[in-house]
Image (cartoon, grey):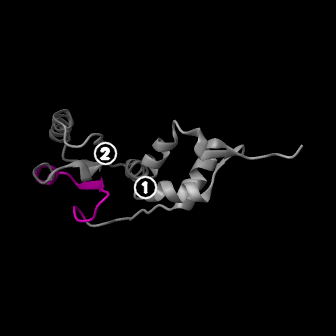
Amino acid sequence: LLTELLGALTERGMKTALITLKHRETANNYRALWRALLNLDSLTVLGLDGAEQLGPLAWFFVRLLSRRLPGLIITNHHPGRLPFLYECSTSPELLQELTADLLGENEVMSFENAAKLHALYSGNIRAALLHCYDRPHIFRKVRTST
């Protein structure tokens, strides 16, 4: 969603940049973040993916350094950092649908397994899909009539 939004802004002639935080509060993550923030010019809308990974002090500095930008759009798994523009939610049905799209028509995840994984990972579809990566037993073959 963030990539799509930044793409739409770029198509309208705005400069955009995307910073993705991958690991919770690591020194390398912060150094890369600060370097990127300091190198942005004042005409760039910043997209920050994974803002929930920043501690309070780091978040303070992101807000401070981004004040000179025309916009800051973040993804965050928890409310409270910035007002919501759009709130996404997941469901076991979505997990089941995505696995069907990925695997094709020959394999399927049961709704029961999708519901268990959705609950286990608190709705985090990415984590649920990673769980499936080395566990092909979660899926069952679909029988085709010949």
Q: Secondary structure at mark 1?
A: helix
Across and down, in percent, residue 74 comes to: 29, 54
Q: Secondary structure at mark 2?
A: strand
From the viewer's side, name the closer residue of 70 and 27. 27
Q: Eyeballing the image, is 82 above or below 11?
A: below
Residue 15: give its label: 2
From the viewer's side, name the closer residue of 16 and 33. 33
Of pointers 2 and 1, the one earlier in the residue sequence = 2
Across and down, in percent, residue 133 comes to: 51, 38
Query: Crowding at label 1, few (<14), some or many (≥20) Cα neighbours within 10 Å?
Result: few
Residue 120: give its label: 1
Residue at image point 18% right, 47% down: 42
Residue at image point 59% right, 39% down: 136
Does the segment drawn in magenta span residue 71? Answer: yes
**Residue type pointed to by label 2:** Lys
Which residue is the extreme one toward the top?
A: 28
Residue at image point 89% right, 43% down: 146
**Which stretch is magenta?**
60-82
Of marks 2 and 1, the one in the foreground: 1
**Residue type pointed to by label 1:** Leu
